[in-house]
């Protein structure tokens, strides 16, 4: 991937008749958001009790993506660059806000760290460093606040963890297609891997079952706890 790849993808989608711009569909506002992750998104205590592979070793992005030096050498520069790409659709977003009181924003990356399990629960505890953007959270909240929408929802992806929760007035949903082996083994709380219905003639009020968001609805998040979950401890002591 290069910095010009987004334009190429947009043109490719356009040629196929795939809409990629903010729009209103049957009264529902749909606003896609550009984003990229930055390591400082992770603000929780690191796991140091086991040897964890480096980000360069674990993440293909560091080898498959090429960026200009002024973007790749700064922690937040790349995430900010992608966030600012949303400004090109400023007028279209404003039009959606005027035309609809119900809006779904969506992104590939994660807008809040609370939408990922604690590090001690993860087979790769450094995962939060390569999943999300603070810029993304700020932008989606700005959109929903300015629209005055009665119902606000953000759909995200990337981590493959099923999630459906309301945080500070916004519903966050991830219903990942995931990899075939994950679906077969019902990994990451996928259960039967059925799509979530979040909107049908209006937003549904009932949250969909999702293992990890259900877990945190009952258990307080404790990021200072670095004792590995049993399944993670077994993984690192093989």
Image (spheres, grey):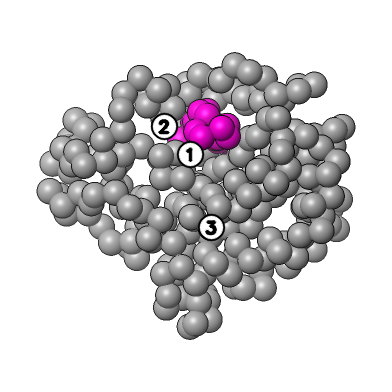
Q: Is residue 47 left or right of residue 197?
A: left
Disc number placed over residue 188 in the picture, else none: 2
Residue at x-position 75% and y-position 65%: 88
Pick the residue in front: 124 or 206. 206
Q: Secondary structure at mark 3?
A: helix
Q: Is residue 18 left or right of residue 104?
A: right
Residue 191 pos. (x, y %): 47, 21
In the rendered image, the vertical position of residue 184 relative to residue 42, given as above or below: above
- Reading the image, the residue beneath label 3 is 135
- Reading the image, the residue beneath label 1 is 160
Q: Is residue 235 visible?
A: no
> Residue 9 is drawn in which quadrant?
bottom right
In the rendered image, the vertical position of residue 227 relative to residue 37, given as above or below: above
- Magenta run includes residue 176: yes
* Extent of the magenta region: 160-177
Q: Quadrant of the C terminus?
A: top left
Residue at x-position 55% and y-position 20%: 208
Label 1 packing within 10 angstroms: few (<14), some (14-19), many (20+): some
């Amino acid at each position: 991937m290069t910095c010009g790849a987004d334009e190429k993808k947009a043109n490719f989608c356009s040629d196929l008749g795939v809409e990629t711009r903010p729009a209103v569909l049957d009264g529902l506002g749909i606003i896609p958001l550009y984003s990229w992750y930055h390591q400082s998104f992770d603000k929780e205590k690191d796991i140091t009790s086991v040897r964890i592979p480096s980000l360069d070793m674990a993440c293909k992005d560091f080898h498959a993506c090429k960026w200009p030096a002024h973007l790749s050498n700064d922690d937040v520069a790349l995430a900010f660059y992608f966030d600012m790409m949303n400004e090109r659709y400023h007028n279209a977003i404003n039009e959606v806000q005027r035309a609809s009181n119900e809006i779904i924003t969506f992104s590939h990356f994660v807008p809040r760290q609370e939408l990922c399990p604690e590090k001690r629960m993860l087979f790769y505890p450094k995962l939060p460093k390569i999943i999300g953007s603070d810029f993304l959270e700020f932008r989606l909240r700005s959109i929903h606040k300015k629209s005055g929408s009665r119902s606000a929802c953000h759909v995200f992806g990337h981590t493959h963890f099923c999630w459906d929760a309301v945080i500070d007035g916004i519903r966050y949903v991830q219903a990942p297609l995931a990899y075939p082996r994950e679906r077969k083994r019902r990994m990451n709380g996928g259960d039967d891997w059925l799509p979530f219905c979040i909107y049908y003639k209006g937003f549904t009020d009932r949250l969909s079952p999702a293992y990890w968001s259900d877990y945190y609805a009952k258990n307080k998040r404790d990021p200072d706890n670095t004792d590995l979950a049993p399944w993670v401890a077994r993984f690192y002591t093989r």
